[in-house]
Amino acid sequence: MTEGHPEEIPEPFELHEIPHELREYIRYPKSWEAHIMDNRPREYCHFKAPGEEWFHLLLPGEIYLQYGHAKFCLNCARRFGHTTDDRLHWQRGPRRQTENPL
Ligand SMILES: [Zn+2]
């Protein structure tokens, strides 16, 4: 167990139906990181959602992705094609590293 981490595995809260595939895969994982937003400082998603003129706030507890200094909510990461729910994505097409996905 890593120092600073709790020893006990969290108990399940309650059983939920899974509405659709929730596992997400990063197509070209090199240089990407996954994080959980804490309460400060305020951070915003790198992208604007279609039809919105503002960068949306990443909320406390939100799982987000990071590439360099840019942070992405999971919606925008999916919207712009950086993630997929296709677990066989790595078998389709040549593995290609996008030099600059931003
Ligand atoms: Zn976003």
Image (tube, grey):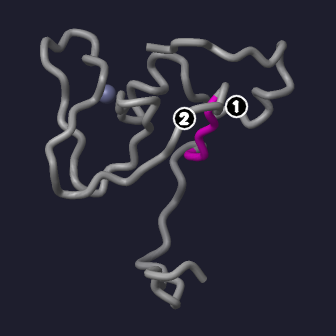
Determine crowd level at label 2: few under 14, some 14-19, many 20+ residues with C-alpha closer than 10 A.
Answer: some
Q: From the viewer's perspective, is residue 51 above or below residue 56? A: above
The picture quadrant where one finds residue 81 is top right
Residue 13: give its label.
Answer: none
Question: Between 80 and 38, which is closer to the camera in this rendering?
Answer: 38
Q: Is residue 62 left or right of residue 34?
A: left
Name which residue lies at 48% across and 85% down: 11
Question: Between 75 and 16, which is closer to the camera in this rendering?
Answer: 75
Specify the amino acid type for callout 2: Trp
The residue indicated by pointer 1 is 86
The residue indicated by pointer 2 is 32
Name which residue lies at 60% across and 46% down: 23
Per the picture, the main secondary structure of the magenta-coloured stretch is loop
Q: Position of residue 62 (x, y in %)?
A: 32, 50
Q: Is residue 23 left or right of residue 42?
A: right
Where is the N terminus found, in terms of image quarters?
A: bottom right
Q: Position of residue 34 (x, y in %)?
A: 49, 46
Whether the magenta-drawn stretch holds residue 15 is answered as no
The magenta region covers: 22-26
